[in-house]
């Protein structure tokens, strides 16, 4: 009798454990890839992300991510100011963006919370360097040109 009661208690604990685990806030996740779609109401985006697989079998995964009004969106660009905070010409700086300024083709890294689906807490945007500008070399603080590695 005692064994069957103990077995029932252990079974109940084993079955309820995953239910409690799902209620805990999940760890933030980062998804990086090309922005392929933006909903007309700018409340969701679709990112095409490549996982860690390499070679000819690599496949893209499309993730639809919801935006909130408080989602922080930043465009990361190279500073042309010689008096940048780091003192290094070519340092990266972040410029705030509105969701309506996102464009298909932008490369993004989205930090998400997945308590109820993927919800963006922040988006970092990197855009290609316009033609005519080179990102192959930058000027170091001492003034000589060094290749970017």
Image (cartoon, rainbow, N blue to C red):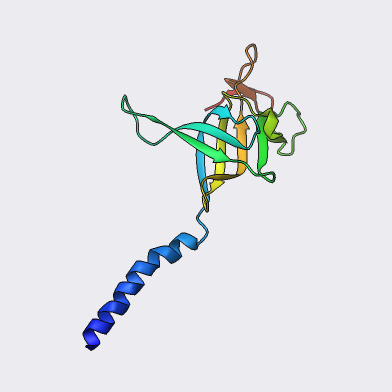
Residue 138 image-quadrant placement: top right
Q: In front: 96, or 91?
A: 96
Q: In front: 64, or 96?
A: 64
Task: Name the residue rendered at 55%, 46% in the picture.
Answer: 112
Task: Judge left or right: residue 24 versus residue 18.
Answer: right
Task: Name the residue rendered at 77%, 33% in the picture.
Answer: 83
Q: Position of residue 20 (x, y in %)?
A: 45, 66
Tally of marks:
0
Task: Judge left or right: residue 48 versus residue 81.
Answer: left
Residue 65 seen from this side: yes
Residue 6 image-quadrant placement: bottom left
Q: In front: 1, or 119?
A: 1
Q: Position of residue 44 (x, y in %)?
A: 59, 36
Q: In front: 30, or 65?
A: 65
Task: Judge left or right: residue 93 versus residue 26.
Answer: right
Task: Name the residue rendered at 68%, 34% in the picture.
Answer: 99
Q: Quadrant of the N terminus?
A: bottom left
* Above or below for 86 versus 115: above
* Above or below for 2 versus 95: below
Q: Position of residue 4 (x, y in %)?
A: 23, 82
**Farthest residue, direction top:** 132
Task: Name the residue rendered at 52%, 45% in the picture.
Answer: 118
Residue 141 seen from this side: no
Q: Position of residue 102 (x, y in %)?
A: 65, 29
């Amino acid at each position: 009798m005692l064994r069957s009661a103990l077995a029932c208690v252990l079974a109940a604990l084993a079955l309820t454990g995953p239910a409690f685990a799902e209620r805990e806030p999940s760890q933030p996740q980062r998804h990086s890839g090309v922005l392929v779609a933006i909903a007309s109401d700018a409340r969701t985006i679709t990112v095409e992300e490549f996982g860690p697989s390499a070679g000819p079998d690599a496949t893209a995964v499309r993730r639809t991510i919801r935006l909130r009004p408080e989602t922080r969106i930043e465009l990361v660009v190279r500073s042309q100011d010689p008096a940048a905070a780091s003192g290094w010409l070519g340092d990266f700086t972040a410029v705030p963006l509105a969701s309506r300024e996102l464009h298909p083709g932008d490369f993004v890294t989205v930090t998400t919370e997945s308590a109820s689906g993927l919800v963006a807490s922040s988006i970092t945007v990197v855009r290609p360097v316009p033609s005519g500008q080179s990102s192959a070399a930058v000027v170091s603080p001492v003034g000589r040109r060094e290749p970017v590695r």
